[in-house]
């Protein structure tokens, strides 16, 4: 499966039925990171959970690819800080919308960072160079 670079967020959720409609709730954390705005219309893809069979009518046959984070420990990237996290750390996004947390930065900072830790949904990086300093 090809995931476009414009991917803003990725999360798991259940589909609920309410008043005759099917509803997928987007976690508040996706809005807190600043990637989404509730006044904008978005495209949404629905995929079966890992290990779950696809019982839907629109089955797509192909291999189930496991996506690795798009960065590795030691990588350097030039990023712009888009938001601040709950603890005040800078938040940037790289390939496929992957979140990079950069302590000691402010919104709008353009920095070169070095990836220090990798997690499934985010990485933690340190500033190598701040172009706005």
Image (cartoon, rainbow, N blue to C red):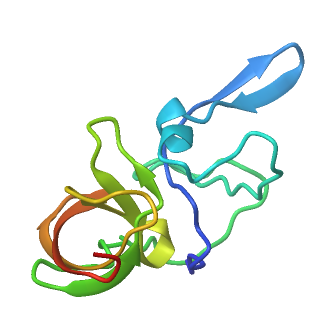
Q: Residue 39 location in percent, x, y?
A: 81, 42
**Looking at the picture, how far across and down is residue 63, in whole percent?**
47, 77
**Can you say which quadrant of the picture contains the N terminus?**
bottom right
Give the side of residue 2 with respect to residue 51, left or right.
right
Residue in view at x 43 percent, y 58 percent: 107
Give x and y (percent) for residue 128: 15, 81
Question: Based on the displayed image, in which of its 4 quarters is residue 37 positioned?
Answer: top right
Q: Nearer the viewer, residue 92 or 13?
A: 92
Q: Is residue 87 above or below residue 36?
A: above
Instruction: Say which quadrant the C terminus sits in.
Output: bottom left
Q: Is residue 123 above or below residue 11?
A: below
Question: Which residue occupies 62% across, 73% down?
Answer: 6
Outermost residue to the front: 133
- Viewed as shown, does residue 84 lie left or right of 57? left
Q: Which residue: 34% across, 85% down?
A: 78
Q: x, y (%) of residue 114?
A: 16, 78
Relative to 77, is 98 above or below?
Answer: above
Could you say which is closer to the camera, residue 112 or residue 45? Answer: 112
- Determine the image quadrant of residue 59: bottom right
Residue drawn at x 83%, y 51% is 41
Residue 130 placement, left or right of 116: right
The residue at the far top in this view is 19
């Amino acid at each position: 499966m090809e995931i476009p670079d414009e991917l803003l967020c990725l999360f798991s959720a259940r589909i609920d039925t309410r008043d005759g409609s099917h509803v997928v709730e987007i976690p508040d954390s996706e809005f807190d990171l600043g990637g989404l705005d509730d006044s904008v219309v978005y495209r949404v893809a629905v995929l079966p959970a890992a290990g779950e069979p696809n019982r839907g009518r629109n089955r797509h046959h192909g291999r189930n690819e496991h996506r690795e984070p798009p960065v590795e420990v030691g990588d350097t990237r030039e990023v712009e800080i888009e938001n601040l996290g709950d603890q005040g750390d800078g938040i940037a996004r790289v390939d496929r919308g992957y979140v990079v947390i950069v302590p000691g930065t402010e919104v709008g900072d353009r920095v070169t960072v070095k990836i220090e830790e990798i997690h499934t949904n985010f990485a933690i990086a340190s500033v190598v160079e701040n172009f706005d300093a």
